[in-house]
Image (spheres, grey):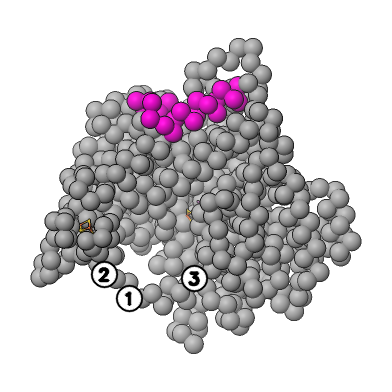
Amino acid sequence: MSQFKKDFSKLTTTKDGQLLLEKAAHDQVETVWERFEAQQPHCGFCEMGLSCRICAMGPCRIDPFGEGPSRGACGADADIIVARNLGRMVAAGAAAHSDHGRDLVEVLAKVAQGKAPGYKIGSPEKLRTLAGVYGLEIEGKSDTELAADLAHAMEEEYGTRQERLTMVNRAPDPRLELWEKLGVMPRGVDRETSEMMHRTHMGVDNDWVRLCLHGVRNALSDGWGGSLIATEVSDILFGVPKPTKSQVNLGVLKEDQVNIIVHGHNPVVSETITLAASDPDLLALAEQKGAKGINLVGLCCTGNELLMRHGIPMAGNHLMSELTLVTGAVEMMIVDYQCIMPSLGSVATCYHTKMISTSDKAGFPQMEHREFHPEIALDLARELVKEAVENYELRNPDKVYLPVEPVEMYGGFSVEAILEALGGTPTPLIEAIKAGKIRGAVGVVGCNNPKIKHDLGHVELTKRLIENDILVLDTGCAAVANAKAGLKLPEAAELAGPGLKEICQALGIPPVLHVGSCVDNSRILVLAGALADALGVDISALPLAGAAPEWYSEKAVSIGVYFVASGVYTVLGVMPPITGSMNVVGLLTKGLDDVIGATFDVEPDPDKAALLIRAHIEKKRKELGLDA
Ligand code: CUV
Ligand code: SF4
């Protein structure tokens, strides 16, 4: 038995994680931590970004110690190789978010054509707001006519014809001018990703600075493009999130109910499953099978989407996904795409759990593929829920282990909801910041990564920030970590510094606001833009920061880059594979400040990361003359 199996408290801070890891060992289920350990030591060239396998003259690698080769077969040096690798990470991340956005636009178009039963315009108000953003003729148009026009305009955003994305106009004017001046204004969502793949082909862009700048443009096409479209269209179809009570951790699974987990990112699938799970016929069938009900819960970002809009409980974040199955209490897991470990199907074979994949672009070993299309989604959702209910009989009670009670939480803080809590305008927030009651705000975002003790990075950093009167907005797996730690309850204001505590208590909100899924980081951009506009400054002048303490995914790289490119200083908890080029490291951690008004830092220790962020926020306050 390997070393780590003896002390699970070294791997995760969470009680449910530790207890389920023990059960996984007992059930002989292999987890991500075990496979991660088997990968040690990692390849040093790859860790530093110094290996290249872009073409068939390679693979090549550069010797960081200067004794071996300093160039690949084509002549690329360390700077070129590192910048190309980083650029391709941005491209993959931007593609993932933006393709998710496209899928939603397609549903919107089908709703307009009456070809998507089971979907509707959930927020006609937001539809009209967005139609306004795109300058569409609104007068006298029905919702479906407007939806058709908006879907068409958004499809154009993905293409080649535009000189700049329309969505980008929501950024403050000084930012737009800066992007224009630097030549990083995103033109088309797919175009920037496609151009990145082109530029990084052998023999195209071999200027590492230009490659990094295109990385900026590519990431902006995600943050202010694909991701923002994903968020806004989700709101149009499924409603704008409002503060909602919910519960989190493995305790949300119920011993006496049919448990269905939705996992992945796109609410297109999980929303129809939500409808089907409350179907009276299926509830009656569940009762017939001896279950007290149908319990739908979420995992990762599709879970965040449901939590934000319907208060559907959340089983856990990224590193908990295998362990949810180890409870032995899951009748069915339905996945769409992104962050779904290919190991899940094999974990499920130890239990009775049915595993269902649903996206034409995402297949997995040992899962049954049942493809969702808007035309048939509702029928398919009903069929799947029925099969889950029927599977309840096959559950083996001896294998069920649900050792924890769920933690209460609040989610649903869309920008609209935050503004509403403030009385309709950002003014009270700005006043609180000016008065120093709130020193600033930080977006804590991103994944889990076995390189960091599970949830430690998120929770410790968040606690240090709120203690020091810094408001935290979080998304993705960070948001789930903070919720599990009890930080998303109004009572958590007790853990905040005196100023933040006063504000939270007056408004009845937690000091850590759940803003949504990863594509909803675009909500943080929009809010930052609104604050900057209200103060008449650029985003980079605001006492704001971003943090991705436990990031793992290429999507997180794109997020980090568009945060920085939007003027938000960002601290990463995991080092990206760039240390092979001190030029690239220098640009990202220092040089960008002069160019774009923000930089990256890397700091795995959450206490130290909090100090870096606090120093940055105090500096920005001083520059704004706030504490004179
Ligand atoms: Ni999109 S991208 S592990 S599920 S936050 Fe979670 Fe969130 Fe990272 Fe993935
Ligand atoms: Fe090697 Fe250049 Fe080909 Fe990369 S692109 S594999 S460095 S020859």
Identify the mark nearer the N-term, 3 or 1: 3
Marks 1,2: beta carbons within 8 A:
yes
Q: Is residue 356 above or below residue 182?
A: below
**Circle number at residue 332:** none
Label 3: element kind: helix
Name which residue lies at 63% across and 21% down. 145
Where residue 565 sits, quadrant-wise, is top left
Residue 338 in magenta? no
**Circle number at residue 41:** 1
Residue 610 is left or right of residue 323, and the answer is: left
Q: Is residue 459 above or below residue 567?
A: below
Residue indicated by mark 2: 44
Name which residue lies at 29% across and 71% down. 43
Residue indicated by mark 3: 32
Ligand 1 within 8 A of label 3's CB? no
Q: Which residues are magenta?
A: 146-166
x and y percent of residue 71 in the render? 14, 60
x and y percent of residue 170 in the render? 43, 27
Marks 3,2: beta carbons within 8 A:
no
- Ligand 2 sits in which quadrant? bottom left
Identify the mark nearer the N-term, 3 or 2: 3
Callout 2 environment at 10 Å: few (<14), some (14 to 19), or many (20+)? some
Cα gap from disc 3 to disc 1, whole angstroms? 16 Å
Q: Is residue 590 above or below residue 295?
A: above
Q: Residue furthest bottom?
A: 1
Q: Amino acid at mark 2?
A: Gly
x and y percent of residue 238 in the render? 65, 37
Residue 368 is left or right of residue 516, and the answer is: right
Q: Is residue 433 above or below residue 587?
A: above
Label 2: element kind: helix
Name which residue lies at 69% across and 44% down. 377
